[in-house]
Image (tube, helix red, strand yellow):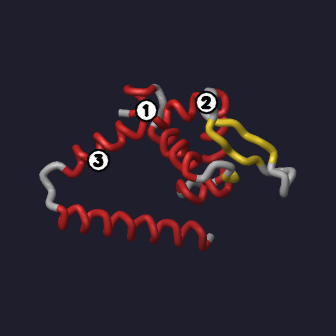
Amino acid sequence: MFLAEIGVSGSQVSALFAIDNKPGCLMKELASLLLLQNSAITGLISRMEESGLIVREPCSNDGRASRLYLSARGKTVVKKAYPLLAAMNVQLKDGFSAAEIDVVARFLNHAITVKFEKETAK
């Protein structure tokens, strides 16, 4: 959906949303937020930087690390992506009661928590 509408993949949109919510985050923080391995986040960030979605700036505390920020293009994509996400959520919830949505949300949050605990235990 995102790729067809705004020319950016769903994984890139997820990363943009995370960086928008936490400007200046480190790559390892973004990897943790998105539940991705370091190798996966490195490739994702490289592709996003090459396409002008984000900007990396050196971290003042760690010379090996970079802080991530949205570029002007990244900010534009985020503005276009939020309404698409809202529309997608409406479609996904269609036909379900609020109680049913609560159960699904609780299940998904539990699944994410279990995966996160397994990943961080490694």
State the mark number for residue 72.
2
Residue 116 in the image: above or below residue 17? below
At horizontal 70% and vertical 53% (from top left) the residue drawn is: 26
Q: Position of residue 101 (x, y in %)?
A: 23, 61
Name the residue beneath numbered marker 1: 80
Please name which of the two marks, 2 or 3, marks the residue nearer to the observer.
2
At horizontal 27% and vertical 63% (from top left) the residue drawn is: 104
Query: Looking at the image, can residue 10 be seen?
Result: yes
Name the residue beneath numbered marker 3: 89
Element under disc 3? helix
Q: Amino acid at mark 2?
A: Ala
Quarter of the picture holding the C terminus: bottom right
- Viewer-proximal residue among 79 and 122: 79
Nearest to N terminus: mark 2 or mark 1: 2
Q: Amino acid at mark 3?
A: Asn
At horizontal 41% and vertical 40% (from top left) the residue drawn is: 82
Nearest to N terminus: mark 2 or mark 3: 2
Quarter of the picture holding the N terminus: top left
The reply, left or right, for residue 10 in relation to residue 62 is left
Spatial CA span between label 2 and label 3: 26 Å
Q: Amino acid at mark 1?
A: Lys
Please identify the residue farthest to the right as the structure is shown. Answer: 63
Spatial CA span between label 2 and label 1: 13 Å
